[in-house]
Amino acid sequence: MSEEVAREQLATLTVAPEGPMDGYSRELFPHWISWGDRCNTRELVLIRDGSDVEVDQECRAVTGTWWSVYDDVEVSPASGVDIDHMVPLAAAWRSGADEWDTARRRQFANDLEAPQLFAVSARSNRSKGDQTPADWVPPATGYHCTYAVHWTEVKTRYDLTITDDEQAALSGMLDTCP
């Protein structure tokens, strides 16, 4: 998706205060579901995003390298890689997912089509936590444009709200687009 389309989508998102965390649990978002051939969502993202990835009979990555776009570092082995939800589960909860049914939350947590799941360094993923762009942006400044485009696309696809601060941060990151 282009920066122009992201700006158009950003302008259509509903701006609202963050909702409460009342009732939230990661378990309400069934994630890392099986896709057959013994592979789950996490393993498929590792295979998709890695280089020279080899898996064992259980579909676990045993070798490979991954480029963490958030902090511009190469990561190996797979144990140093986390699968990040572009829009974190808790952030989605605070912006409308608290009203979804389990099937919709499962789809969101395992979406391999939208720019929602990325293999990144464990360090960058844990630094991000459940924060929105209002409070956290990737250390790799060259990724800010793409990050804002992806975030906006996911929020639009799932009809999630954004805060004023989140909208301002996304707009600023879109200003970095070439």
Image: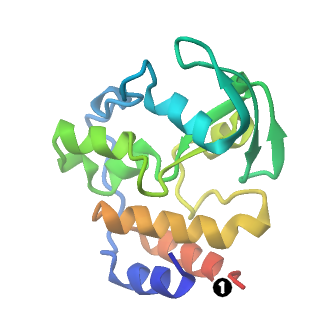
Judged from the image, the secondary structure of the residue bearing numbered disc 1 is loop
Does residue 161 appear in this view? no
Identify which residue is drawn at 31% across, 54% down. Answer: 19
| For residue 25, above or below residue 73 | above
Q: Using the rendered image of the protein, determine whether residue 131 is visible from the camera's viewpoint.
A: yes
**Residue 81 or 38: which is nearer the viewer?**
38
Q: Position of residue 113 (x, y in %)?
A: 41, 53
Q: Tell me: residue 52, above or below residue 124.
A: above
Q: Which residue is mark 1?
A: 175
Instruction: Give coordinates of residue 125: x percent, y percent.
Output: 64, 41
Residue shown at the point (34%, 74%) measured from the top left: 15
Query: Colour scheme in the image?
Result: rainbow
Vertical order, 83 against 15 (above or below): above
Task: Report whether 101 appears left or right of 143.
Answer: left
Residue 71 is left or right of residue 153, and the answer is right
Instruction: Residue lying at the far top in this picture: please name it.
Output: 57
Q: In which quadrant of the rendered image does the C terminus lie?
A: bottom right
Residue drawn at (61%, 80%), measured in percent from left and top?
Answer: 174
Tell me the residue at 51%/71% (across/down).
165
Answer with left or right where residue 96 lies relative to residue 79: left
In the foreground, 163 or 66? 66
Q: Amino acid at mark 1?
A: Asp
Q: Is residue 148 left or right of residue 121?
A: left
* Viewer-proximal residue among 23 and 91: 91
Q: Tell me: residue 56, above or below residue 93.
A: above
Q: Find residue 137 and report its image quarter.
A: bottom right
Mark 1 burial class by Cα count in 10 Å: few <14, some 14-19, many 20+: some
In the rendered image, residue 124, in percent from the top left (x then y), is placed at 71, 43
Residue 173: x %, y % from top left: 64, 75
Examine the image and state in which quarter residue 168 appears. Answer: bottom right
